Image: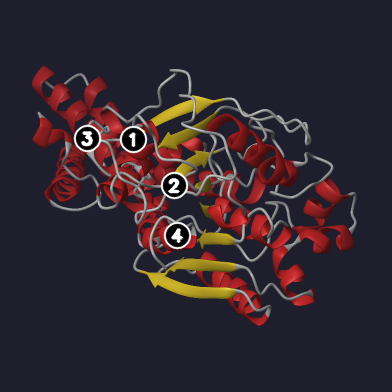
Amino acid sequence: MTDLMSLSLIDGLLPVAILTLGAAALILLGIAGRKLGVRRVLIFVLVAAGSTGLLFLLAEVIFLWWNSSFPRLLYLYWALGILGIQLAFALAVRRRTPLAGRVAGIAAALIVLLAVACTVNLAYAQYPTVRSLVNPPSATDDPLPRPAAVDATLPAASERTWVPPSDMPGEGRVYRAEIPAAASKYKSATALIYLPPAYLADPGAVNLPVLVLIHGQPGSPNDWLISGRIAEMMDDFASRHAGLAPVVVMPDASNDSNPNWPLCMDTSVSASATYLARDLPAWIQQQLGVGTAGPQQWAVAGYSYGGTCAVQLAANFPDAYPTFVDISGENEPTDSEGHQALLDTYFGGDGKAFAEQNAVDRFGRMPFPGLAGKIVVGREDTVYGPEGRQVYEAARAAGVDVQLQELPGGHSWLVWRAGLENNLDWLGARLGILDP
């Protein structure tokens, strides 16, 4: 069972087998469908094409459920799935179809749907393994442990100075927490907090650094836990560095599922920037006793919407986040209905108010010599890739110590997870855990 649970859903034999079976099932349904007559099968094809066109219209013209980064090939798979369902249903209700044929047709339709789901997962790598789908990791509701010490004068633990106790846990833990909004009054859903083995040791490491991770849209902090496998990633890092790793805080960036998601800016919708850059650090320092040695212990990172947020926060609050990782972010916050709609919704139509907080505009107005970051783009990401390069050029011109990294893949977790994991050693050095 363990080997089955660890099977990959994004590469290897299992997805190949699912897609092969799906194709075979659709072919068999097509062959059996000859009994229905050419005219009826043609109608099914037209219905499949029409429903696909309707989905496109609803999703990309009327309701704007997703943007142009959505893989267009998935529409074809949707059409094939609809065709398979129609054929299976028509064969199942046909009087002359024997019971075994009806069961086989329904089974074939289910296999086709499984293959369609597999293509979606391959596009985004949302569920990397069988375990992540059927038994995903979850956070504990246990109370957060009290810190070893809350004293900003104590030297921060580092690989050079930290000596782990013999009974230090082998793994970190992920906790749920409600992080209040004392200054911003921001409405937030539950956050997730990863505490590394060194923090959980007795006595624990003193004053570890903090990495704030922002999720995408749509999404939640759980995406970092399930699709990003953040606990596994940080445990692997800690195992190489005497149990040391940053405390990872994954806040809710949706304003508790506000229909108008905040932009990691302070707007008429919510003061999300103040929440993320002021309320959150203050609470983390007080409650967990980490990140108290200074801004050099703090970093922010994110993917897609969260990557845009990471740059926004670093450019507007370099005293809070002098280190950032932008993975597949945009060149500026956007609204699905256009830039003017964004200005109207968030800034009362005031373009200058937007530009005052927009990272690329800020990079054009002032230097940022103390800021350092990584901008990661997917090689096949034709939408966010060019925008990430624009952010890189603007940041470099502003004196930011920035590096552009290109990884194989599109707008998916294949890039988002690797974009963080590949930069953990750099983050560890920036944050003071590792020697620079």
Left or right for 118, reference 157: left
Disc nearest the viewer among 2 and 3: 3
Q: Label 2 vs label 4: CA separation?
A: 9 Å
Q: CA distance from mark 4 to mark 3?
A: 27 Å
Image position, residue 31 (x, y; %): 15, 43
Residue at x 14%, y 43% (from the top left corner): 21
On residue 427, the disc is 4
Q: Which residue is mark 1?
A: 172
The alpha-carbon separation of the residues under discs 2 and 1 comes to 11 Å
Local packing at callout 3 (Cα closer than 10 Å; few below 14, some 14-19, many 20+) is few
In the image: residue 385, left or right of residue 259: left
| Element carrying mark 2 | loop
Residue 383 visible in this rendered orientation of the protein: no
Report, in whole angstroms, how far the alpha carbon at label 1 lies from the one at label 4: 18 Å
313, above or below 246, in the image: below
Q: Nearer the viewer, mark 3 or mark 1?
A: 3
| Disc 3 from disc 1: Cα separation | 16 Å
Name the amino acid, label 1: Gly
Give the amino acid at mark 2: Pro
Which numbered dot is residue 246? 2
Q: Secondary structure at mark 3?
A: loop
Q: Secondary structure at mark 4?
A: helix
Q: Answer with mark 2 or mark 3, whichever residue precedes in sequence.
A: 3
Q: Earlier in the sequence, mark 3 or mark 1?
A: 3
Residue shown at the point (60%, 62%) measured from the top left: 330
Q: Quadrant of the C terminus?
A: bottom left
User: In front here: 208 or 247?
Assistant: 208
CB-based contact (under 8 Å), mark 2 and mark 4: yes
